[in-house]
Image (tube, rainbow, N blue to C red):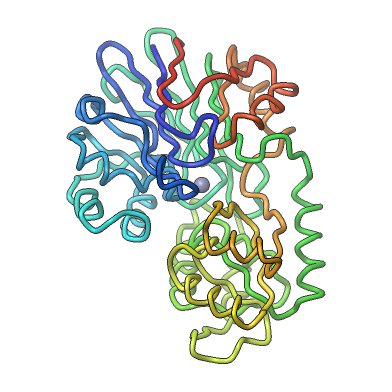
Amino acid sequence: MRATAYGGFGEKGRTSIAVSTEGFTLLLDCGVNTSDSKTYYPALNPAECAGLDAMLISHAHEDHIAAVGWAVAHGFRGRLLMTRETRAEAPAIWKAYAPEPEYRHAMSLPVELIPAHGVFHLGPFRVETGRSGHIVGGVWVHLASAGRSVLYCGDVVPSSAVFPMDPLPVAGLVMLDGSYGEDDVSGEMRFASIRQYLGRNPACILPTPLIGRSLEMLALVEQPPALAPGMLEGLLRQLDQVDWLRPGIAAGLRDRLALTIEWQPDQPWPDRPLLCHDGMGLSGPSVQILERAGREGYPVLFTGHVPSGSPGDRLMQKGAAHWLRFPTHPTLSENRDIAFACRAGRVLAHSCAAGVLSAFARSIDNLVVDIRPRGSIEI
Ligand SMILES: [Zn+2]
């Protein structure tokens, strides 16, 4: 069995890695890199796109799914698999982060639905999935064949207050979500910092992806927030997915949602925090809202990944916005626990820059630090 990286290793964005055995190649995720137009798409050539037997998408964030249509345009004709909930969110991501022809290509592919938590077979692989704790519809993926196994975490959150994460199986090779590198600050401390900011800035803008962090923000913000156009529907859709939420959490969040107000961009700023999507000003209502906030000097708090060169990044460079991490990926301790619990013989980490990986290796045993796009490893 062999794993070949095509994006997201030694860099953040365009996450995609192929796992091959017995002449069958499965691509795990197919994302874009919003930080760099030169490496926007995975490093697959057309022959490699055409040679993929299947593609399995872990969740509907652009750095894991937005290059599906691009792969079709470059020859991909294999099977496409994802959960029902990821399928429901995929068109919006393809629309926002892929040009129109790629959007149409992606939409033209039939999708095979996979379980949130279960086992199925794909070519020579026994595939096991489990909920990732990161977003409704998001899964980790475990592949096994002929006594070899690999666990791809995708994006995981072991300690989300809103989304549950299923226990991870043992694997020979584990691919961790390295988005936060060496960061080991607990979620509680992060949330306390955000609450303090909101105490000082009771009316401000909180950009967030439409799904995932948005629901966790609703749970965190003490005063029921104002919602940009489309946000209410996004939050309601997630609250309908009770199998993806921690037990008992939906009713409380639904009550809180009933107290929010829907806000329109032509209105004066609301007297409370405003949730708007996306989280970086590249698509959705955030484009216009952040442009106006920059012009008027209105407070903005970013809480997730803000790619360099994005509108969010430009606001921060000017000192016109703040950033505090809202944890939606594992801390260093959580990753160390995952690698230990899975008894990983070798470990890779995706979604972090090369320099961060070397530092990360000081704390994670058996971490392979030198794999880059187009590099591969025997399992
Ligand atoms: Zn994600």
Identify the residue shown where x is 21% and y is 37%.
Answer: 74
Identify the residue shown where x is 49% and y is 89%.
Answer: 266
Q: Is residue 367 left or right of residue 2?
A: right
Which quadrant: the N terminus?
Answer: top left
Q: In this view, does 106 lie to the left or right of 192?
A: left
Residue 172 versus residue 349 in the image, above or below: above
Identify the residue shown where x is 42% and y is 50%.
Answer: 60
Q: Nearer the viewer, residue 379 or 319?
A: 319
Total labels: the figure holds: 0
Picture coordinates of residue 21 (x, y %)?
32, 13
Residue 180 versus residue 223 in the image, above or below: above
Residue 26 versus residue 106 in the image, above or below: above
Q: Nearer the viewer, residue 321 or 189?
A: 321
Picture coordinates of residue 48 (x, y %)?
25, 25
Picture coordinates of residue 249 (x, y %)?
61, 60
Q: In this view, does 213 lie to the left or right of 82?
A: right
| Residue 304 falls in image quadrant | bottom right
| Residue 67 falls in image quadrant | top left
Q: In this view, does 18 lie to the left or right of 330?
A: left
Residue 259 versus residue 16 in the image, above or below: below
| Residue 109 falls in image quadrant | top left
Picture coordinates of residue 108 (x, y %)?
17, 50
